[in-house]
Image (cartoon, rainbow, N blue to C red):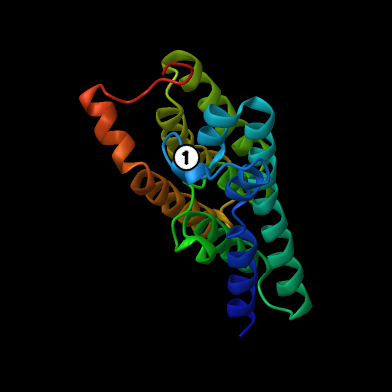
Amino acid sequence: MTWLLIFVLSYLIGSVPWGYLIARLKGVDIRQHGSGNIGTANVLRVMGKKWGYLVFLCDFFKGILSVKLGSLIAAYFLVNVGLGSVIAALACVLGHDYPIWLGFKGGKGIATLAGTVLSLFAPLVFVSFGVVWIAVFLISRYTSLASISAVVAVPIVACLIVAKAELPLLVGFSVLMAALAIWRHRTNIARLLKGTENRFGKK
């Protein structure tokens, strides 16, 4: 019952569609513009940096809040705090990707995943996530390629520095999240392979 409580609450936190809500406050249905995605990249392209960065921060802190909540609930009910945190992180990203409020059509989860990585892993793993994303983006100007590269880097770096006791749980989570991110970016991957993916800053 404790695990279900953590999952449901974290899913609901993750499912708050900040990109959609913030754009709506400005009279824009972000689903009808650009790529139609409610995430940071599309809001940034359509509405500008100020709103795009705001959406990133809101989605990022969803991940942090969910992991914190999961750990607190697990500690209160005297169950495994590490497992509670991972369940919360997983549910939050799923909530972002498949929000009940928008017919289960959400974002791609990268900003929210970044928040969970910061909360679950050693700082070096989060730094590696950010460095890989920035480096690939600056070289390629593809946000999709940067995102895929960053999430794939997480389990690799985690294997190198995570303590043995935590390794199966955290690496398992990061592999699952990398697979989900790749699945969510499958249309981007197809366009990358065809050479038709749009570079950031280029119409």
Q: What is the crowding at mark 1: few (fewer than 14 residues within 10 Å), some, or many (at least 20)?
A: many
Asked if 107 appears above or below 200 in the picture, the reply is below
- Residue 40 lies, in percent from the top left, at 56, 37
Direction from residue 8 to residue 144 in the image, left or right: left
**Quadrant of image for the C terminus:** top left
- Residue 127 lies, in percent from the top left, at 63, 31
Residue under numbered circle 1: 151
- The residue lying furthest to the left in this view is 194
Asked if 59 appears above or below 42 in the picture, the reply is below
Residue located 68% across and 68% down the image: 81
Badge 1 element: helix
Residue 118 in view (yes/no): no
Q: How many marks?
A: 1
- Residue 125 lies, in percent from the top left, at 60, 38
Q: Toward the viewer: 144 or 161?
A: 144
Q: Toward the viewer: 111 or 72?
A: 111
